[in-house]
Image (cartoon, grey):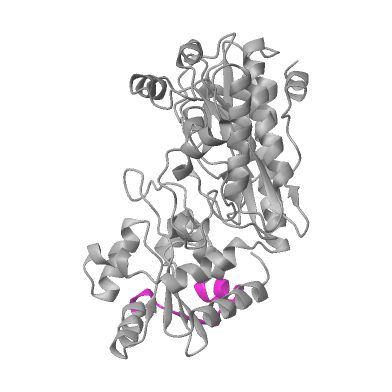
Amino acid sequence: MFPAEVYIERRKRLQKEVGTGIILFPGNRESPANYADNPLPFRQDSNFLYYFGLNRPDLTAVIDIDADEAIIFGDDLTLDDIVWTGPQLTIREQSAAAGVTRTAPAADLASTVAKALSHRRPVHFTPPYRPEHLLQLSALLNMPPGEVSAAASEKLIVAIVEMRNIKSAAEIDEIEKAVNISADMHLAAYKMVRPGLTEAQIAAEVHRVALAAGGQLSFPIIATIHGETLHNHYHGNTLKSGDLFLLDAGAETSMGYAGDLSSTMPVDPVFTSRQKEIYQVAFNAHEAAIAALKPGVPFREIHLLACRTIAAGMKELGLMKGDLDEAVDLGAHALFFQCGLGHMMGLDVHDMENLGEKYVGYAGQEKSTLFGIKSLRLARELKPGYVLTIEPGIYFIPVLIERWKAEHKFADFINYDKVEAWKDFGGLRNEEDFVITDTGARLLGKPIPKSIEEVEAIRG
């Protein structure tokens, strides 16, 4: 945990922004994998961590803005529990570390909320993303489950987003710990990959590195020779000579802060000439985007810069043609780059995604519905303290190519006859994490190989 003063100051700021009423923070519960005593790894709600820091299940917190008071509701372990868990600090003792002096049994929560409702005080909460949150809020608010999400407090959402988007120096240090562990995960893969290994063997070693460093995974590992499937969590293939291997993996620290890196490497010691051509195009887009990072620049412009760089490279290879600015404006480049350039990162690997990209990445503005651009999670003007990823990629997705070719879509910009020869290429991307500074941006964590020369050096 951070010092108690950090959590006290965060709650004070939130109270000021929201104004009046009470704020509910449902903490997460254990989630059984297949029966109650065999739970999935526990992960506390990120807003609960941000404002209270307690990484313990079955807690709910309330901030009473008008009384200037925070309360944590929960039940201490019984002797029967302690037999299995060992001695634990009481909720009161743990809460004191977050600067909270008032605690109460879980059963008292309902009367606290009911009292606020009876006095017509606003009850603020964020949209539930777990079924147990939904049912808890439904019961507390005496509201049908289907109406709960729509009743979430936009004022609270905006206040949390604007606070959590700006990372403090202490948060950046914690994120950098996660990124350094993530880098070690990728370095292990660079040194391990070879023909005959399975994706599962590499994923297992990558996971081991995270655990051995005292971390967890910030998201399920992507370790695949089929990089054209953007979020491919299947690990059943065997690597063979001529393949490209894509790893997208990150660590999470004990405090819940995430790292997120991607790397693409040849299964052989060196790239083929064909692999180099596409890899270099993506690398050029990556470097162009990094050079453009600075406060005051809308991230959407940096994304479009990467798109134009990819389109230019594909034109040089004969896969695209025509006016590239027009092609990107219309979305023709998305045959090769279907997703966004990057996203916010912090306590969540896609920071606060449950609160809505409209607020987190778009400052309340509506997102584009254009294919490719609609997958851009971050578009807003950059500010110092933002932590984000840069991850341009190039993906040859056979079903997408076949569909667009059959529809003669963007035929003025795409040479489908030449693209046909690349349908079996797969996909690639590299990804790094940056913090926006007062004058530009700084790479977080130790660098991992990125250029063709760097990759081949470590692979050799």
Q: Nearer the viewer, residue 356 or 101?
A: 356
Look at 63% across and 24% down and name the residue there: 313
Q: Is residue 304 located in the magenta-colored stretch of the structure?
A: no
Look at 60% across and 11% down and name the residue there: 195
Q: Is residue 88 visible?
A: no
Q: Nearer the viewer, residue 188 or 333?
A: 333
Q: Position of residue 329 (x, y in %)?
A: 51, 39
- What segment carries the magenta color? 91-107
Residue 283, quarter of picture: top right
Q: Residue furthest left?
A: 144
For the C terminus, the image quarter is top right
* Count of marks, rendered view: 0
Q: Nearer the viewer, residue 153 or 326?
A: 326
Query: Residue 113, relative to residue 45: is it above or below?
Result: below
Query: Residue 388, relative to residue 94: is it above or below?
Result: above
For the N terminus, the image quarter is bottom right
Q: Position of residue 90 (x, y in %)?
A: 52, 72
Q: Is residue 333 visible?
A: yes
Look at 51% across and 27% down and name the residue there: 336
Query: Residue 141, relative to residue 31: is it above or below?
Result: below
Q: Position of residue 67 (x, y in %)?
A: 48, 90
Q: Nearer the viewer, residue 110 or 10?
A: 10
Query: Residue 238, relative to residue 14: is it above or below?
Result: above
Residue 190, quarter of picture: top right
Q: Is residue 291 left or right of residue 123?
A: right
Look at 32% across and 43% down and name the residue there: 34
Q: Position of residue 370 (x, y in %)?
A: 42, 42
